[in-house]
Amino acid sequence: MSYDPVSKWEEFIRSRYWDDLLKLAESYPSTRSLIVDFADLDRYDTEFADDLLENPDVMLDAAHTALQEIVLPVDVDLSGAHVRIVNLPQHLKTRDLRSDHIGKLIAIEGQVRTATEVRPKIVRAAYECQRCGHVFYVDQSGTKFIEPYECPNEACDRRGPFRLLPKRSQFVDAQKVRVQESPEDLRGGEQPQTLDVELGDDLVGRIFPGDRVIINGILRSYQRTTQSGKSTYFDLFLDGISIEMMEQEFEEIEISPEDEKRILELSRDPNIYEKIVRSIAPSIYGYEDVKEALALQLVSGFSKRLPDGARIRGDIHILLVGDPGVAKSQLLRYMAKLSPRGIYTSGKSSTSAGLTATAIKDELGDGRWTIEAGALVLADKGIAAVDEMDKMSPDDRSALHEAMEQQTISVAKAGVMATLKSRCALLAAANPKMGRFDRYEPIAPQINLTPALMSRFDLIFVLTDEPNVERDSHIATHILKSNYAGELTSNKHNSSINEEDIENATEVIKPEIEPELLRKYVAYARKNVFPMLTRVAMERFKEYYINLRSQGQDGNKPVPVTARQLEALIRLGEASARLRLSNWITEEDVDRVIKIVESCLKKVGVDPETGMLDADVISIGISKSTRDKTKQMLNIIKELGGKDGAHIDDVLDRAEAEGIDRDRAEEIISRLRQEGSLIQTSRGTLKAV
């Protein structure tokens, strides 16, 4: 090194970071870090920047010394301040780390899996010699605690005993986190690798499981110890220097004044709804009603705390049920990408522990039992997309009930009692039981989900795949154009393809609003807009709800909707007003959400026999007409049979005479036998249990 690093740092900070240093001096000690962009160092002196990457310990010590030596206009001692380097030129994956990287300054990107509690770590231990009373200090820089060998007092020079003085020792806040590689960076059969990171001082407590981060730090190694002694293999860990957030929650996304100007301009556009709908999954043709609902799910309503302590959720849950090949999974993946902290998982390969939380023996936290968060907790304040929900085991599905309504996950495992937050919107997809929908059957029984779970969804969309020449022609054209655009983009290097061709071809799959701007738009709406019901909107919601309920006033008619649907209407109304950045829910919003909810109810919540809305179809799984006919069948069996039971043919004849279709009667008998309410003997007699 042909220069003095301390004076070099002083010169660099004075010329490029003087204002930042003054801000640090004014707010010290509440802020204790001077953030330096590596690109500025590189522009200032390339050799100096390279030395920092190669010998970070020496260079960062020099930077710390320079901070203390610079004469400031304010009288402050910056001995506890740090220089933190961000934006390193190259990001490494955990699997690419080699022995050459030990001791170098590197950047690792990935997702935080676990984080220990913040605890004090000793950096300078004070000892008192029990023989002569001399107090001395031992620096603790490595991973192992160093105890003194002999008393440094020459008059004593004895080997102890020594007493540790915690009050006179120097501590620093410390935390360990485990970072896992992001799944999108992996090859086929690779399992994501993890790296432990040690954070100190003002870096602690800033990142949580589920965050996607870039951590810059010095790679260090320590020797493994096994039962048979010390191993020749060493383990790696990262000594964290700085943290950069890759994806923030909507509320944390930074919006510049220029962004705000564009967002407010967009909100005044009368076609804002159509524009946002065209910006969601543009590679998928049609489904405007579903995409509009997904746009409302992105901005969502807002949660409210009532004076009695009750909480009303604001997140909107949507279920897509449909035939195979109608692009459900693609919609789910797109939404998980668009939302910060969006997580996509498939129900078939997820257990309840993987979705909610599990207790593990944590090596990071010295072998204690800790809770490891599952997908719904990691998606807190984002969207959890669960595909193939019907393939999950019933036990695993039951774990979703609390997560959907209370938006918490309670865990009592291995002596650990915890309640984790899962304030996420659930976007689920399921297939019909028989693979395809039977259009002549009621829809609810064709979906392999419990009524208790289905009733928690605000919107249930049924996507059927019915041949239609005109629509099929549009879909075929759209798919062919999308693929052609993909082919052109993949063959950019071909000299016969020019930029204009690519531009024209990609027009068909280009979102109206760029994903980055759409994210900022949604973030702005969620952060700043909390709409309230106008008197007109309140009256319209009330009128619509009471009109629907009044259909069920007659004792022989089904209950059309429950209070859950009214809450869903209000949530959707808030989201509709938020989409155009309005502080009031107007009549226009009411009309929009009633249209969406009605289209869903007419497909799912209708009794096919009577054609009337029936809340029981979703909440209980049986329509009122089926329930009435079941009672009628049981009465017939009791009347005809007495103690010995009634013969099945007599029961079917009587049912037919009383106006119940013979096939329908057989179906009811079959269901009652499955439920255990009826017994059929070998002689064909039926007995009620």
Image (cartoon, rainbow, N blue to C red):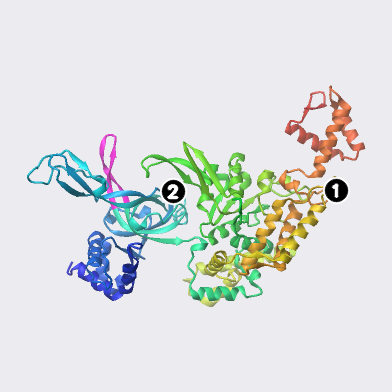
Residue at which label 1 appears: 554
Where is residue 103? Give x, y as percent. Answer: 26, 56
Q: Main secondary structure of the magenta part?
A: strand
In the drawing, does residue 551 fall left or right of residue 283?
right
Q: Amino acid at mark 2?
A: Gln
Image height of 642 relative to 665, above or below:
above
Image height of 605 relative to 480, above or below:
above
Q: Quadrant of the C terminus?
A: top right
Q: Quadrant of residue 451?
A: top right
Where is residue 476? Give x, y as percent. Answer: 66, 64
Between residue 259 and residue 680, name the one nearer to us. 259
Label 2 CA crowd tier, 10 Å (few <14, some 14–19, many 20+)? few
Q: Secondary structure at mark 1?
A: loop
Q: Is residue 93 magenta?
A: no
Task: Please give the name of the residue rendered at 47% of the width and 61% of the height, measured from the top-left corner.
Answer: 247
Between residue 578 and residue 3, name the one nearer to us. 578
Q: Quadrant of the N terminus?
A: bottom left
Instruction: Give yes or no for contact between labels 2 and 1 (Cβ–Cβ under 8 Å).
Output: no
- Mark nearer the viewer, 2 or 1: 1
Where is residue 540? Give x, y as percent. Answer: 75, 63
Q: Amino acid at mark 1?
A: Asp
Q: Quadrant of residue 287?
A: bottom right
Q: Is residue 230 magenta?
A: yes
Label 1 CA crowd tier, 10 Å (few <14, some 14–19, many 20+)? few
What is the span of residues highlighted in magenta in the rendered image? 220-237
Count of residue discs: 2
Q: Earlier in the sequence, mark 2 or mark 1?
A: 2
Residue at which label 2 appears: 191
Q: Secondary structure at mark 2?
A: loop
Where is residue 542? Give x, y as percent. Answer: 75, 59
Task: Please give the name of the residue rendered at 55% of the width and 48% of the height, measured from the top-left corner.
Answer: 408
Viewer can see residue 36: no
